[in-house]
Amino acid sequence: MIDRRHMTELSDDEVMLLDALWDGDCALWMLQQAHYQATTDLPYCHRYTDEQLLEALSSLTERGLLRAYLYVYAETDDKRYYGLSQEGGAYWELERKPDWDAYVYSDERDGMWSVESASLATAYDYARWAHEAGWGAPHWQTLTQIEKPMYRFFPWADFPLVYELYGEAQAKTYQLGWDDYHERRTWWLDILELLDL
């Protein structure tokens, strides 16, 4: 059994498949038992054999909860990919009840650090933490702020407004660790953090 709200007719195993897809599409092999936990970083896994997995994915697709397509640029022989449809995302929300104002996405690339959130206060809370913790974030008072209206945060969901804060990445000093992180945390980055919020 997994922690869920039982607001849909989905089986536990089907909810676990949606858990793998809430923030992006996955190749078929990523959803297989042998790779599920490495793909998702989740402590649980569905019980489907590879054959049963194909049947489950086909059923979810036929019910309008998943999108199935071939990604021709995939570097693997099997190019089957799956993602949540808008309806599938709504089902996932019913089971997980995400607080989107508390969700953050942070990234660092090309020498720039950034955080995005539907809540400006949450974005600044995370930026302040990441700077004080020495996780590469510049001082929060130096960050550039931009607004992204009708922003597609996920393939299945458009948000009316998302805020992004960004600035030049700093050297990582890791002054604070995970215990401090969880003590200060008012946001979530993934499902485990969402369930523990």
Image (cartoon, rainbow, N blue to C red):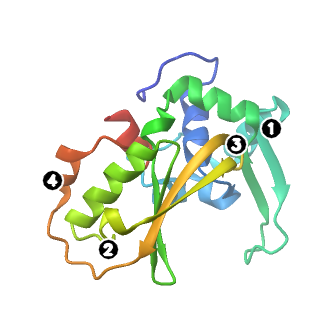
* Tag 1: amino acid: Thr
Residue labelled with disc 3: 158
Q: Earlier in the sequence, mark 1 or mark 3?
A: 1
Measure how far apart labels 1 and 3 are at the Cα level: 21 Å
* Tag 3: amino acid: Asp
Residue labelled with disc 1: 61
Q: Earlier in the sequence, mark 4 or mark 3?
A: 3
* Tag 4: amino acid: Asp
Measure how far apart labels 4 and 2 are at the Cα level: 16 Å
Q: Secondary structure at mark 1?
A: helix
Examine the image and state in which quarter residue 195 appears.
Answer: top left
Camera-side mark, 4 or 2: 2
* Residue closer to the observer: 51 or 121: 121
Q: Earlier in the sequence, mark 1 or mark 2?
A: 1
Q: Earlier in the sequence, mark 4 or mark 2?
A: 2
- Relative to 4, 150 lies left or right: right
Report the number of numbered marks.
4
The label on residue 180 is 4
In the picture, the quarter occupied by the N terminus is top left
The image shows residue 40 at horizontal and vertical percentages of 49, 54
Residue labelled with disc 2: 136
Measure how far apart labels 1 and 2 are at the Cα level: 41 Å
The answer to whether any part of residue 48 appears in the image is no
Q: Is residue 107 above or below residue 152?
A: below
Q: Residue at x 79, y 66 (%)?
A: 79
Q: Earlier in the sequence, mark 3 or mark 2?
A: 2
Q: Earlier in the sequence, mark 1 or mark 4?
A: 1
Camera-side mark, 4 or 3: 3
* Tag 2: amino acid: Gly
Q: Secondary structure at mark 4?
A: helix
The image shows residue 22 at horizontal and vertical percentages of 59, 44
Measure how far apart labels 4 and 3 are at the Cα level: 33 Å
